[in-house]
Amino acid sequence: MANKILTIAAHPDDELLGLGGTIRKRVNDGDKADCLILGEGLTSRGNDREQVSKESLEELYSDTYQAAEFIGYDNLYFSKLPDNRFDSVDLLDIIKEIEKIIKKVQPDIIYTHHYGDLNIDHQRTFEAVITACRPVGEYGVKEIYAFETPSSTEWNFQYGDNTFKPNLFVDISETIEAKLKGMDCYDSEKRDYPHPRSLKALKTIAARWGTVIGKEYVEAFELIRKVED
């Protein structure tokens, strides 16, 4: 039976960095995938939001749509919250954005950021997702997974309960190239090696997780909650 998947990401490119190969694989297997991107992207790179032009943002969203074709997302939803300033937005407002799309998509499975990420927007996204998916009313989300986001998850040098503790590993050996082609669409986001958002680094990260389970290329996830009927 096909599943309805919703990726809830903070910024454009987050929707593929840690899970692009997995989404492509699931879509190839018959699942349907949509994506909500909460933040506008880019605007934190100037001293104020107005320093980033409307044209630059439009180019970023165009890149996102191009990347989605490689990854396999059917629909993209943008909330355009202030980039890297989610702590300036009431948590309830973020939750309501998520609830609106959950009601529309009615996903069986949600993928979102890890709670221990360095980036404040990722942390708030996770918190809002967990709140939006509380088991009340017509509860439908059966599985919630946290993905790692290269250049955020591993840069938060913490220990204990906030570390990324993957317990699900997905073989993406057949879909790694689709992920890399998707990332290659992002002119403003991809970087040169050894930056974690370089194409070479993404392949290296997938190869590293592959060594954990004896596969060539793998994406790793932390299962947050799973409900079986």
Image (cartoon, helix red, strand yellow):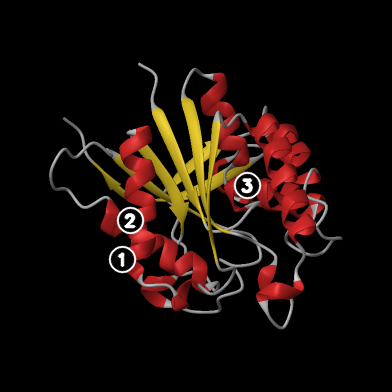
Disc 3 to disc 1, how far (Cα)?
Answer: 41 Å
Where, by quadrant of the figure, is residue 142 drawn? top left
Viewer-nearest residue: 205 or 86 = 86
Q: Is residue 164 above or below residue 107?
A: below
Q: Mark 2 near mark 3, Cβ–Cβ under 8 Å?
A: no
Reading the image, the residue beneath label 2 is: 96
Reading the image, the residue beneath label 1 is: 92
Residue 24: image location, x then y, percent:
60, 30
Reading the image, the residue beneath label 3 is: 211
Mark 3: which secondary structure?
helix
42 relative position to 132: left or right: right
Q: Is residue 189 above or below residue 159?
A: above
Please state which amino acid type lies under the numbered disc 1: Leu
The residue under the point 80% across, 49% down is: 199
Does the rendering let one see residue 189? no
Viewer-nearest residue: 157 or 112 = 112
Disc 2 to disc 3, how far (Cα)?
Answer: 40 Å
Whichever of callouts 2 and 3 sits on the residue coming sooner in the sequence is 2
Q: Is residue 125 above or below residue 210?
A: below
Crowd around label 3: few <14 · some 14–19 · many ≥20 (10 Å) = few
Mark 1: which secondary structure?
helix
Whichever of callouts 3 and 1 sits on the residue coming sooner in the sequence is 1
Where, by quadrant of the figure, is residue 76 drawn? top right
Where, by quadrant of the figure, is residue 53 drawn? bottom right
The residue under the point 79% across, 56% down is: 55
Please state which amino acid type lies under the numbered disc 2: Lys
Q: Mark 3 near mark 1, Cβ–Cβ under 8 Å?
A: no
